[in-house]
Every structure is written in C-alpha cells, then in structure tokens.
Image (cartoon, helix red, strand yellow):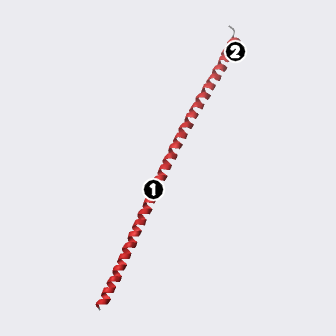
Amino acid sequence: MDLPKLIGILGGWSVIITALAAWINKLSTERMLSKWRRDEQATAERLREELATNRSLLDIATKSHGSGQDILQRKRVDAVGKLWNETIDLRTRLSAAQ
C-alpha cells in the first residue's frame, strides 16, 4: 500500500469520526439543554405556587388582624361609653347630694 492511499484512507476516516463526534456532541448538548429547561420550568412553577400560597396566607393574616382591630375598637368604644355613663350618673348623684 502506498503512502498517499494510506493518508487518503486515514483522512477519510478522520472526517467521518470528526463528523460523528460533532453529531453526538450536538445531540448530547441538545438533550442537556432540554433537561435544563424542563428543570428550570419546574422550579419556576414551584416558586409561583409557593408565592401564591404565601400571598394567600398574608391576605388571611392581614384580614384577621384587621378584624381583630375592629373588635378591639368596638370594645374601646363600649368601655368609653360605659365610663361616660358612669361619670354622668356620678355627677347627677353628687349634685343631688348637695
């Protein structure tokens, strides 16, 4: 076998092997990117769900706090009303005693 034919054969195989390696590399890269995108989308969806849950809990806590404040305000108003009525009653009794 002469040298030019051997170089041609080896060169041909080099081209074939290089092309095959490039194709396998491209395929594996596409698969990795596809998996990465799926994982990223799953993570983003999980974070959206957690955010929605946290927002709901915050809304519930805020409403609960607000209704608690309303109850306390009503109790304060009732207490001031009772105190005012007792003050008027005491004033009336003291003025009658004189």
Between 5 and 97, the one nearer to me in the picture: 97
> Which label is found at residue 60?
1
Q: Which is in the foreground here, disc 1 or disc 2?
A: 1
- Residue found at the very far bottom of the displayed protein: 98
Q: Is residue 85 left or right of residue 48?
A: left
Residue at screen point 48% across, 47% down: 50
The picture places residue 32, in percent across and down from the top left corner, at: 56, 32
Q: Is residue 67 left or right of residue 42?
A: left
Residue 10: quadrant of the picture: top right
Residue 29: quadrant of the picture: top right
Mark 2: amino acid: Gly
The picture places residue 81, in percent across and down from the top left corner, at: 38, 76
Q: The residue tagged with tag 2: helix, strand or loop?
A: helix
Between 59 and 20, the one nearer to me in the picture: 59
Taking 37 as reference, is 64 above or below it?
Answer: below
Taking 93 as reference, is 3 above or below it?
Answer: above
Q: Disc 2 marks which residue?
A: 8
- Residue found at the very far left of the displayed protein: 97
Residue at screen point 67% across, 12% down: 6
**Number of other residues with Cα within 10 Å of mark 2, as a class: few under 14, some 14 to 19, many 20 or more:** few
Mark 1: amino acid: Ile
Distance, label 1 to label 2, CA atoms, is 77 Å
Residue at screen point 43% across, 62% down: 67
- Residue found at the very far top of the displayed protein: 1
Q: Quadrant of the C terminus?
A: bottom left
The picture places residue 78, in percent across and down from the top left corner, at: 38, 72
The picture places residue 51, in percent across and down from the top left corner, at: 50, 49
Residue at screen point 39% across, 71% down: 76
Between 92 and 42, the one nearer to me in the picture: 92
Q: The residue tagged with tag 1: helix, strand or loop?
A: helix
Q: Is residue 35 left or right of residue 94?
A: right
